[in-house]
Amino acid sequence: MRFGFDIDDTLINLREHAFHIYNKKLNRNVGLEVFRQLRTVEIHEAFGMDKVEGGKMWTSLLEEIYFTDCPAFDGAIQFLNQLQADGHEIFYITSRPKEYCPRTKEWVKKIGFPVKDEHFFCGMQDDEKINIIKDLQLDYYFDDKPAVLKTLNDITTKVFVKDQSYNEHVTIPRVTDWTTFRVE
Ligand SMILES: [Mg+2]
């Protein structure tokens, strides 16, 4: 089978990692309970910032957010390595900005995910992911972002949402825990 994965907040806990960095940079101590109640993919509301301020903060910290010690979700690295061991094909489809793509691929390899160079797609817009998913004829695709998932209604690929506070309204099959998740 052919499996496709978004990376940020599907396989790795990027927003929470960024949340800790924001607290440190802003010398704040906003609690994780605030983080867990966010209904937006963006995290700036938790720090009382508006969209513009939040966007600037995010961009200014991207290096640190992307390339330090962001953890994978429990079981995610093991799940993908098991898929590979079982003979499945694994593809990554991430909309990180183009200039960060080569280093992202190396970073994802370094933390233990199985990556074939030609199976790593990066730098597209959210609404362009569907074209790649179709071209690759994926059997399964996993993402966390409502803006992406809403474009994937009409495809034969089985789509799963990685459970997050901002996607509770999405009514497709859900991955809550990679340690116990299995496809039928
Ligand atoms: Mg994502």
Image: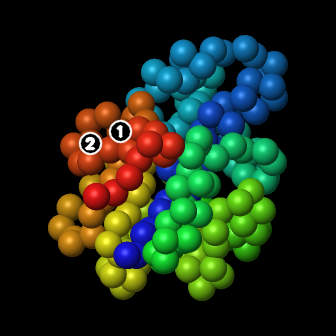
Nearer the observer, 106 or 27? 106
Q: Is residue 136 left or right of residue 31?
A: left
Q: Residue at x 63, y 79 (%)?
A: 116
- Look at the numbered disc 2 and give the secondary structure of its residue: loop
**Vertical comparison of 51 with 86: above or below:** above
Nearer the observer, 87 or 37? 87
Asked whether the residues under the numbered discs 2 and 1 touch, taking CB atoms below 8 Å apart as contact, a structural biologist would say yes
Residue type for callout 1: Asn
Q: Residues within 10 Å of mark 2 (few under 14, many from 20)?
A: some
**Vertical comparison of 56 with 112: above or below:** above
Residue 167, label in figure? 1
Quadrant occupied by the C terminus: bottom left
Q: Is residue 161 left or right of residue 84?
A: left
Q: Residue at x 59, y 31 (%)?
A: 44
Q: Position of residue 46 (x, y in %)?
A: 57, 22
Whether the residue under disc 2 has CB within 8 Å of ligand 1: no
- Look at the numbered disc 1 and give the secondary structure of its residue: helix
Nearer the observer, 124 or 105? 105
Residue wearing tag 2: 170
Q: Position of residue 74 (x, y in %)?
A: 59, 41
Q: In this view, does 106 lie to the left or right of 41?
A: right
Callout count: 2
